Amino acid sequence: MELFTPEVGLIFWMLIPFLIIFFVLAKFAWPAIIKGVNDRAQFIDDSIQSAKTANEKLEAIQKEGEEIIAKAHNEQLRILNEAEDMRKQMIDEAKNQAKIESDKIMQNTSVEIQKEKEDILRQVRSEIASISIDIAEKVLRGNLDDKNAQKGMIAKLLEEIEHGKN
């Protein structure tokens, strides 16, 4: 069992290098290691905080983008509605203008037709009067050559005039 139980001298001589190494490590290595670990922890904490801040900004930007898109969509709808209203108004104005113009054209055409009708009636009356005069002249020439025929014609006309007055 001697193999498993160390002697006091061996323990002493092993304790001295252990304490020296422990002291050197405690004095120089542990502060550097702890500082490195703390720096790394601080860097990780800062990175996490930056990531959270970036996420918050990204969410804010996304919300702002969605709001801008919604506003743009509403503006687009408003502009489309205004354009539709303007189109309807322009169509109504064009219809009204066309109606006014067609009424004017119809009125002018009606007046022109009436004038042409009156001109044609005057021409027809003039032609009829001219033809009647020519016919009457020819009839009278033929009938007035004979004296008895002239007297008969005068008598007949006088009778017609008297009957017309009564």
Image (cartoon, rainbow, N blue to C red):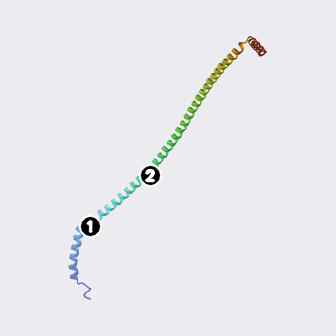
Mark 1 lies on a secondary structure that is: helix
Callout 2 environment at 10 Å: few (<14), some (14 to 19), or many (20+)? few
Q: For the residue marked with disc 2, what is the amino acid?
A: Glu
Image coordinates of residue 133 in percent, x first then y, are 67, 17
Give the CA distance from mark 2 to mark 1: 48 Å
Q: Nearer the viewer, mark 2 or mark 1?
A: 2
Residue 146 lies in what quarter of the image?
top right
Quadrant the N terminus occupies = bottom left
- Tell me: 138 left or right of 7: right
Q: Which mark is residue 66?
A: 2
Residue 93 lies in what quarter of the image?
top right
Query: Is 42 placed above or below 98 here?
Result: below
Image coordinates of residue 114 in percent, x first then y, are 62, 26
Residue shown at the point (62%, 24%) measured from the top left: 120
Q: For the residue marked with disc 1, what is the amino acid?
A: Ile
Return the residue nearer the eye: 74 or 40.
74
Return the residue nearer the eye: 23 or 80.
80
Residue shown at the point (39%, 57%) measured from the top left: 55
Query: Is 52 placed above or below 119 here?
Result: below
Residue placed under numbered mark 1 in the picture = 33
Query: Is 61 placed above or below 119 here?
Result: below
Image coordinates of residue 151 in percent, x first then y, are 75, 11
Q: Residue furthest front?
A: 146
Image coordinates of residue 87 in percent, x first then y, are 51, 40
Whichever of labels 2 and 1 marks the residue nearer the N terminus, that label is: 1
